[in-house]
Image (cartoon, helix red, strand yellow):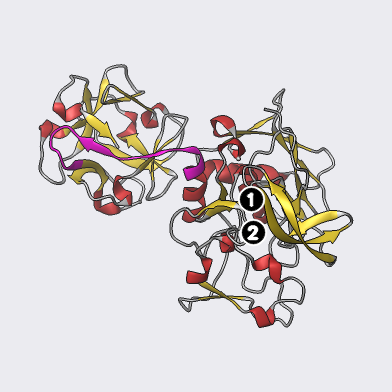
Amino acid sequence: MSTSALSALLLGGCGLSHETEQAFPGRSGEVVTARVALPGLGFQTVTYEKIDGMAVLEGDILLDLREAPTRSGQSVARTDTYSRWPGATVPYVIDAGLPDSGRVTSAIRHWESKTSLRFKPRTTEADYLRFRPGSGCSSYVGRMGGEQTVDLASGCGLTAAIHEIGHAVGLWHEQSRADRDNHIIINWGNVQSGTQHNFQTYAQQGADGMDLGPYDYGSIMHYDAYAFSSNGQPTIVRRDGGGSLGRQDSLSDGDTRGAESLYSPRARFSSGVAGNRCLDVSDGNPAQGTLTQIWECNGSAAQEWFLTVRGELRSTLAPNRCLDVSDAKTTPGTRVRIWECNGTAAQKWTISGGEVRSALGSNLCLDVSDAGTALGTAVQIWDCNRSAAQKWTRF
């Protein structure tokens, strides 16, 4: 999942297809190229459409052209840290008049099942999302400060709600990555006249962006192949010859990695038993129940973890898999594995003084069995004893 974003007040509207991926479906306006103030970057040249007095970028993004936006306090994402939601927690309100509010609650449950992000009904928080009816599907990108709206027209279903929440937490359209031309071809001859600017990359727009991980054809944040087509022919094709673009039912692994990367630092752990042994998921297998071991440090995803604000160690192999004490047992020698993240004490860890302590007990540490140095030696929990078998160096 790439994460790239605009360092300005942005409103991105998307839906199940390019027909609803517009802030003003079925309407066009005057094409304007102008210098726009992007916070942190100064003035940049941006091409947009002017519709009902609003600046519409990329067909479904509303630009706030104020030079100094007001804030109450940042598989494409915003790079400025202000746009992140503190504590990876997003307060929200659902308008009483929003039809089918269940699509919002279902989308929230989906995000929570796949990532460490949490959503809570707003009480007194100054910064929060408001889900409300709208003419299309739209959302600001990242936390903007104060109340920010997520508009969902009646045609914006569950997939659109998941997508718009992706914008709200900081993700942008995948095809806007700076490296997209290495992976897709834009068929300019099939693009509707006057809409070519919708296919700019964020580098071309003077935006603050970062590309995270491999290009993700299956991202729920990716335009479909026929976006803004003038003749029913594809406007976007894959360079690798594959057929599908975008995902129509759920977040891809790339989406979850992209979102997790915004809120959780990555880390690897080398063992004190030997200089080149790392905490490792056996065979790089992301399946639930795969056991952990030590293995020669190799920089692979099997040895990389997201450290979440909730005390979890989420495997980058699949960010909804957490380092887990098997069956939540407290018996010394219990194996440690990866398991679907569930928020229990078996998946909570405290890293301090070179130890990785389990929340299951005050004296249970992550341990290399018998202080072995052989490749494949099991990782378990054991009574904390400050030995080399329990010494872990985060890097």
Name the side, left or right, on which 388 lies relative to 205: left
Can the viewer see residue 278? yes
Residue 171: % across, % down: 58, 50
Q: Residues within 10 Å of mark 2 (few under 14, many from 20)?
A: some
Q: Residue at x 51, y 56 (%)?
A: 2
Residue 157: % across, % down: 71, 55
Residue for badge 1: 6
Q: Residues within 10 Å of mark 1 (few under 14, many from 20)?
A: many
In the rendered structure, which amino acid carries the disc numbered 2?
Answer: Gln
In-front residue for pair 174/293:
174
Please, is residue 289 above or below residue 221 in the view? Answer: above
Residue 194: % across, % down: 77, 73
Q: Residue at x 62, y 42 (%)?
A: 40
Disc 1 versus disc 2: nearer the observer: 2
Residue for badge 2: 205
Earlier along the polypeptide chain: callout 1 or callout 2?
Answer: 1
Magenta stretch: residue 265 in it? yes
Task: Locate residue 9: give its quadrant.
Answer: top right
In-front residue for pair 94/91:
91
Magenta part of the chain: 261-277
Residue farthest along the top direction in this orientation: 362
Q: Residue at x 71, y 29 (%)?
A: 72
Are the residues tagged 1 and 2 within 8 Å (C-beta)?
Answer: yes
In the rendered structure, which amino acid carries the disc numbered 1?
Answer: Leu
Residue 101: % across, % down: 75, 44
Mark carried by residue 64 = none
Q: Quadrant of the C terminus?
A: top left
Mark 1 falls on what kind of element?
A: loop
Mark 2 falls on what kind of element?
A: loop
Name the side, left or right, on which 373 lies relative to 353: left
Residue farthest along the right direction in this orientation: 52
Name the side, left or right, on which 318 lies relative to 227: left
